[in-house]
Each structure stands twice: as structure tokens, then as C-alpha cells.
Image: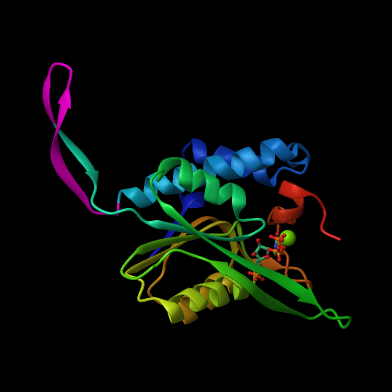
Amino acid sequence: MIFNLDKTTSIANAFLAELRDENIQKDSMRFRKNMERLGEFFAYEISKTLEFQRKETQTPLGLANTAFLTEQPVLATILRAGIPLHQGLLNVFDQAESTFITAYRKNHKNGNFVIQVEYISTPDLTDKVVIMADPMLATGMSMVLCCKELLNRYQIKELHIVSAIASTEGVSHVRANLPKAKLWLGAIDEEMTSKSYIVPGLGDAGDLAYGVKQ
Ligand SMILES: O=P(O)(O)OC[C@H]1O[C@H](OP(=O)(O)OP(=O)(O)O)[C@H](O)[C@@H]1O
Ligand SMILES: O=c1cc[nH]c(=O)[nH]1
Ligand SMILES: [Mg+2]
């Protein structure tokens, strides 16, 4: 399953447009906020696919028949660029627990890089719905490695992947390696640079949110 925001129109498309805009993205607070708002939008869309139960809720004037989430998802993210997107999801799934993973590109002098996964801090994910957020799905290698780490440790019930922008190659890599994952994407861009940056993409999401990495 792939949900592509770019194929729909709502106010969330404007959040993505601002994230891509080279002038607006210079305002790092607005960049983080737009990423957070996108996370809130995706949380709402994902929530439509989750299980709800009905119960009686006491209002000051009587009993109302209301719907509530049967179980909380766990919200996972990859540091550091994932933080604002994760925060948006957490604003909506406000009872959810969180998983944090570090993954970064370790560059070689020849221009190649490997993904280094170093730190995982997580609650028990057994039989949980896990929503993994990372704004950029470029080669898809960080996403696949991080999800595989979690899937090797836990019997996860359902995996959702949220990204602001994916490349066509990243989507193929995820679908080949995580065939059961549901993908929630802001847009799918066709191209990548020789350094595996998405084109047109938005640039370096981590640097735009938190400063240029040394
Ligand atoms: O699909 P991939 O080719 O693996 O690339 C995507 C990864 O690159 C970015 O992180 P980055 O390595 O820039 O780290 P940062 O969050 O610290 O900036 C992004 O947030 C993803 O985690
Ligand atoms: O386009 C890209 C690729 C990887 N990481 C980013 O932040 N942007
Ligand atoms: Mg980065």
C-alpha cells in the first residue's frame, strides 16, 4: 500500500511545498514546524486505518456514544532528521510510546557511503503497530536497515513508514525488502544526485532542521 500526498490536494500539500521552497526553508523554525504539521497530517490519515472501539462517555449532560483507539501505536524515528516528523505524529497519537534509532551515512573518500546503525532505544514492540518516520527516503538503505533491526528483535504486528519525500529507487528498495510495510509519502521524486540526494527533493533535511553537520 502506498499513500502519495502529491496525488491528492489538501492543506498538507502546502506544508510540503514550503518544505521544498529554498527561501522559506531558510527559516529553520518554520521548516521544523512544517515537518511537524506533515507528521500530524499523516497521523490523522493513518488513524483512519487503525482499529477503534466504541464506548459510553459521560458528558456533563448525559452519556455519549464515542469512538476510541483500541490500542496505541509505537512511534519510531531515525535521528536526527526524523525528530520533527516524529513530534507531529506524537502530537496526534499523544499516548503513544516511542522508539529512537541512530543511523547516519558514513562517507568514504571515494564518494561511497555505508549506513551506520548504532543506537536503538525502544519499548517492547511485540504485537504492536509501529509507525516509522524519517523525512527522506533516498536510497532507502537507512529505512530498511533500521526497520530490519526492529523486525529481527520483535514480532511487529503492522509496520507503517512515513516520509516527506521518497525517491523512486527508495520506494523500490523498501518494497523489495519490507513487502508488508505500508508507505505514507508526501511525494515520490524520480531522480537522485551522484551523492544520493533526492532531486528535486528538498536538500538535507537534518541540516535544514538542526544546522549543517560537520
Ligand atoms: O535513504 P537513505 O539513502 O538511507 O538516506 C536517507 C537518510 O538520510 C538522512 O539522514 P542523514 O544521514 O542525513 O542524517 P541526519 O538525520 O543526521 O541529517 C535522512 O533523514 C535519512 O535517514
Ligand atoms: O535528499 C536527501 C537524501 C538524504 N538525506 C537528506 O536529508 N536528503
Ligand atoms: Mg542529514
Q: Confirm whether the magenta stretch covers residue 58.
A: yes
Left or right position of 154 against 140: left
Tell me which segment is drawn in magenta: 49-64
Residue 91, given in percent of the width and then of the height, sits at 47, 41
Q: Give the quarter of the image for residue 128.
A: bottom left
- The residue under the point 76% across, 53% down is 207
Left or right position of 96 against 114: left
User: Which secondary structure dominates the residues rendered in magenta?
Assistant: strand
- The residue under the point 55% across, 73% down is 146
Left or right position of 183 against 198: left
Relative to 64, is 116 above or below?
A: below
Relative to 195, is 132 above or below?
A: above
Residue 101, given in percent of the width and then of the height, sits at 58, 66
Residue 183, given in percent of the width and then of the height, sits at 45, 63
- The residue under the point 17% across, 47% down is 53
Q: Nearer the viewer, residue 65 or 12?
A: 65
Work out which quarter of the rendered image holds the N terminus and state it.
bottom left
Location of ligand 1 given as a quarter of the image: bottom right
Q: Confirm whether the magenta stretch covers residue 195.
A: no
- The residue under the point 57% across, 38% down is 14
Relative to 181, is 69 above or below?
A: above
Q: Nearer the viewer, residue 124 or 187?
A: 124
